[in-house]
Image (spheres, grey):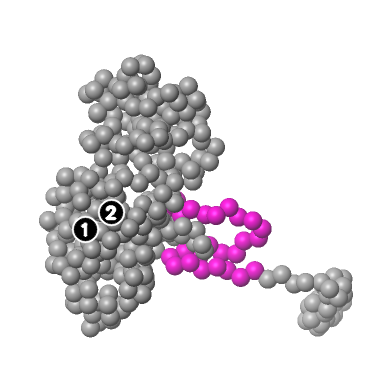
Amino acid sequence: MRMKIRLVLRLLLPALLALLPSIAVAQGGADSEVFELYPEYVYGRDRGPKMGYTKPEVFDPLSDKLYRSGYKNYSPIGVPVELKKADAMTRVETMGAIIACADGWFWPFSRTARNNEPPGLEIEILNAIAKKRDWKVAMMWVNMATRFGPGAPGGAYDQSINKGSCDLVMGLTITGDDHHNDANALEFTRPFMSTGFVLVTQHSAKKVKSLDDVKRLGLKVGLPAFSPMSEYADEHGIPHETFFQNYQVIDALVRRQIDAGMIWSGAISQARLNRPEAEFELVEGYVPIPEMRWDSAWVIKSREKDFKKFIDESIGEMLESGEIKRIVERYGMPFYPPVTQ
């Protein structure tokens, strides 16, 4: 008897399954809709399908399992064999594209961006340069922190520009300690802006306009520990309280633990992205003191004279026209012209 029941079920099951779609339509009515989800693919990541509203994502390579497992240090476009050993300018002109290496998360300078999210001010500057020649920009993501890692200079450079995978590397600051450039046969481009530690205030500290005011009023200013700013404050007797990093100074401001801070100018843009409830503001007209201000630039292989000349001239034109200033300030970051023109 049991064998007969099993045989009947086995014969009926395919017919029942075939009827399910028509049953679903009958229950939903003639106007019922079928919703389908399609996976969204972005280079280096498969974020998968999602329903409903999702807050725009900021890619953090430190917590991304796919990135950490190897989806990095790969050129986004192939270079033809005949162009592998060509000079950069010839390769760019032939391919109609500049390949740039940058950190996947270095806001507001660069980040992997999805859909219409802003990619970072340095990428926008390079896009503007490329557009003048109707070229494209292709991004290769590297962990720039590794350029000073074990066996430095190496790390990020060995995985990118030293292999010929990109034409230039972004996200660099000219500090005067540039020993890694010679070892990698690299040269800085013309600086396109400068960054530095800036004074931000809120509430009771609104009357403070300078570090001299901080000293005169005996007001403690928050600043990142083990930073050049921390050393400067110790040497010049500026009352201060230290926190581990810029973002912790910002968190202390949000909690009203302090009402004044000296933070890196790029951290203002980071705060507007990650701490929209923050009330502090940059002191109007504040300019970083010379000791706490550095130029931002890119690096190119020393042998690529023509390509470097093109980039340098383009940066000069954009500085003169104010185009770089407009791009930087769109990111909520103060623009300071390069110290070295």
Report the front residue among 20 and 15.
Answer: 20
Which residue is located at x 23 percent, y 36 percent? 290
The correct choice, above or below, for 13 with respect to 176 in the image is: below
Q: Is residue 181 left or right of residue 239?
A: left
Amino acid on which disc 1 is placed: Thr
* Quarter of the image where one finds residue 270: top left
Q: Does dot 1 land on a helix, a strand or a loop?
A: loop
Question: Badge 1 is on which residue?
Answer: 189
Residue 242: image location, x then y, percent: 35, 27
Q: What's the magenta region?
A: 37-63
Marks 1/2: CA–CA distance = 9 Å
- Can you see residue 157? no
Observer-nearest residue: 85 or 71? 85
User: Residue 108, position in %: x, y?
Assistant: 40, 50
Taking the image as drawn, is residue 63 in sight? yes
Residue located at (48% from left, 53% from top):
58
Residues at marks 1 and 2 touching, judged by CB atoms closer than 8 Å = yes
Which label sits in the foreground, 1 or 2? 2
Nearest the eye: 274 or 164: 274
Judged left or right of residue 255, residue 152 is left
> What main secondary structure does the magenta stretch of the protein show?
loop
Q: Secondary structure at mark 2?
A: loop
Task: Assess whether residue 48 is covered by the magenta stretch.
Answer: yes
Q: Residue furthest front?
A: 321
Disc 2 marks a residue whose amino acid type is Phe
The label shown at residue 192 is 2
Q: Name the residue rendered at 22%, 77% in the picture.
A: 90
